[in-house]
């Protein structure tokens, strides 16, 4: 890599570990949605007891329409819905009487009920704070607002304006606000001071709780994997505050939108609708905005899964207004130049490359140039071709294998719909007699854990051997996604003892404080 970054591999030689994929919102809670409080600590404890070393969550940015974590309203802010009411009570910022619970379903998130409920709790917490509760936190809050002003000021104003206009897409606001007329923004800041204060205070509370969560994970020998969407939401403070970073046209509407060509998930491709980047402007600025969003997430996690990694080499640009993604074309991304800039600023590249979908050789070249582990998914493996990269005999050690991802069915649900020939391929590959539907998920996990990949991961739904009812997301479906939650009783399943034994037998058990591995991982993550 002459003249470029000398990247240290994320995983040390001969590293073997495992973990589970679970979104924070899927944790149990009496308040309608999983959060980063006591249930998250209990989850970490259960992972540690089961011999796991990693917890991977989905993106935790503030969600908008559709509640998708991959369409956040900001690349820097967190989702205030996952603030723990229990910890606000513990902090003296809420009273128990402020937090009536029990009216929410246990098995799924009712966003229509949760959003106004959590908003009222945050309003109450801020009112208590203004009235003098926890006055000792005021210096820390003021310091937070100062240190994070480079994104917080715009984000808080953006949220206050969205509230004023009933949640409308920001391009539907008055033109003077869309175009960020300075006098109009100053007037809005004065008129919406309360809403701005609430949005800022919520981010401060979430930061404190996230720091507590990360500290607890590290005390248990667990590391956290975060997830960074490649694109940003068209209706986000990112685009509103930084229009020059995106290919926008008349009245700041996108000239092109993102998507992917026809693939495994969709015969007509996927039309995501995100604005695409103006990489030339980003390059001239030293990729500072991208580096800042990576640094922000690394404040809360140890490793980042880079969603849609192929976008760094080329992204599918679809003309705005097209009915499907089929009319798009590939446009070049920043390639190695961005990762060299990131390494210069951050000193490391603690990333996992999501290199799935329609991937060309230049994507693998970029991934390997910086020693980034790629992803393999067993649900894609059994098409009958021995050179399928998702078959374990084709793995390199510097990779992460999943039974499935958040976009896949559960392993049980996948097997239920699997064609007979692919079922035979799977059992033949495992060199065992054909099993029934209840054996599919344990079989995939056993195959992942026994593989050469440095890290083996499975969604918690697969450990629980759940079916289609537990699927997290169906790509291309607008409603009903991102709702699944588990209940506290599910933590008592014998499956945790089973996966502990599997982890030990596959040499993936990580004893806490193993000096060689701990030191190597710390070097790789710096």
Image (cartoon, grey):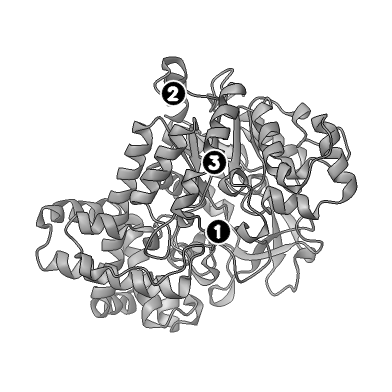
Q: Residue at x 21, y 54 (%)?
A: 90
Front in this rendered view, residue 138 or 97: 97
Q: Nearer the viewer, mark 3 or mark 1?
A: 3
Q: Nearer the viewer, mark 3 or mark 2?
A: 3
Q: Earlier in the sequence, mark 3 or mark 1?
A: 3
Task: Specify whether 191 is left or right of 170.
Answer: left
Q: CA distance from mark 3 to mark 1?
A: 19 Å
Secondary structure of residue under mark 1: loop
| Vertical placement of residue 230 versus 363, above or below | below
Q: Is residue 204 visible?
A: no
Q: Residue at x 44, y 39 (%)?
A: 46
Q: Residue at label 1?
A: 70
Task: Specify whether 48 is left or right of 2.
Answer: left
Secondary structure of residue under mark 2: helix
| Vertical placement of residue 235 versus 372, above or below | below
Q: Residue at label 3?
A: 20
Q: Earlier in the sequence, mark 3 or mark 2?
A: 3
Q: For the N terminus, which image quadrant? A: top right
Q: Position of residue 313 (x, y in %)?
A: 67, 44
Q: Residue at label 2?
A: 523
Q: CA distance from mark 3 to mark 2?
A: 24 Å
Q: Position of residue 257 (x, y in %)?
A: 65, 65
Q: Residue at x 58, y 21 (%)?
A: 507
Secondary structure of residue under mark 3: strand
Front in this rendered view, residue 137 or 100: 100
Front in this rendered view, residue 234 or 391: 391
Q: Earlier in the sequence, mark 1 or mark 2?
A: 1
Neighbours of disc 1 within 10 Å: few (<14), some (14-19), many (20+): many
Task: Specify whether 89 is left or right of 221.
Answer: left
């Amino acid at each position: 890599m002459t003249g470029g970054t000398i990247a240290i591999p994320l995983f040390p030689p001969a590293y073997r570990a495992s973990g589970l994929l679970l979104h924070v919102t899927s944790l149990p809670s009496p308040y309608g949605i999983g959060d980063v409080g006591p249930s998250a600590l209990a989850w970490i404890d259960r992972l540690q007891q089961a011999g796991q070393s990693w917890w991977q969550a989905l993106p935790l940015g503030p969600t908008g329409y559709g509640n998708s974590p991959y369409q956040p309203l900001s690349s820097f802010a967190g989702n205030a819905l996952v603030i723990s009411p229990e910890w606000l009570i513990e902090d003296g910022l809420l009273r128990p009487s402020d937090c009536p619970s029990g009216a929410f379903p246990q098995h799924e998130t009712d966003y229509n009920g949760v959003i106004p409920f959590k908003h009222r709790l945050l309003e109450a917490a801020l009112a208590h704070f203004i009235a003098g509760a926890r006055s000792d936190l005021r210096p820390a809050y003021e310091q937070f607002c100062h240190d994070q002003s480079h994104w917080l000021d715009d984000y808080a104003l953006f949220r206050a304006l969205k509230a004023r206009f009933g949640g409308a897409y920001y391009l539907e606001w008055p033109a003077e606000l869309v175009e960020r007329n300075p006098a109009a923004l100053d007037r809005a800041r004065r008129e919406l001071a309360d809403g701005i204060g609430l949005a800022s205070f919520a981010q401060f509370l979430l930061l404190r709780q996230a720091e507590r969560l990360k500290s607890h994970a590290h005390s248990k020998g667990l590391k956290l994997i975060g997830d960074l969407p490649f694109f940003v939401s068209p209706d986000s403070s990112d685009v509103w505050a930084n229009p020059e970073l995106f290919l926008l046209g008349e009245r700041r509407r996108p000239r092109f939108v993102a998507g992917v060509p026809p693939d495994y998930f969709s015969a007509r491709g996927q039309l995501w609708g995100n604005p695409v980047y103006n990489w030339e402007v980003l390059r001239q600025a030293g990729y500072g905005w991208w580096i800042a969003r990576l640094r922000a997430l690394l404040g809360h996690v140890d490793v980042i899964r880079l969603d849609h990694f192929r976008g760094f080499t080329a992204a599918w640009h679809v003309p705005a207004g097209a009915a499907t993604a089929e009319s798009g074309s590939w446009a070049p991304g920043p390639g190695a130049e961005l990762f060299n800039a990131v390494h210069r600023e951050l000193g490391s590249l603690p990333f996992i490359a999501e290199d799935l979908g329609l991937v060309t050789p230049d994507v693998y070249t970029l991934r390997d140039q910086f020693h980034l582990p790629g992803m393999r998914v067993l649900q894609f493996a059994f098409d009958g071709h021995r050179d399928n990269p998702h078959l374990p005999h084709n793995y390199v050690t510097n990779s992460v294998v999943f039974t499935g991802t958040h976009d896949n069915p559960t392993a049980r649900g996948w097997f239920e719909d699997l064609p007979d020939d692919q079922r035979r391929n799977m059992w033949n590959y495992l060199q065992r007699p054909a099993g029934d539907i209840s054996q599919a998920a344990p079989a995939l996990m056993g195959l992942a854990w026994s593989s050469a990949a440095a890290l083996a991961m499975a969604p918690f739904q697969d450990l629980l051997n759940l079916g289609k009812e537990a699927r997290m997301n169906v790509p291309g479906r607008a409603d009903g996604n991102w709702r699944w939650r588990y209940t506290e009783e599910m933590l008592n399943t014998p499956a945790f003892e089973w996966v502990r034994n599997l982890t030990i037998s596959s040499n993936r058990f990580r004893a806490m404080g193993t000096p060689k591995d701990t030191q190597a991982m710390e070097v790789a993550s710096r």
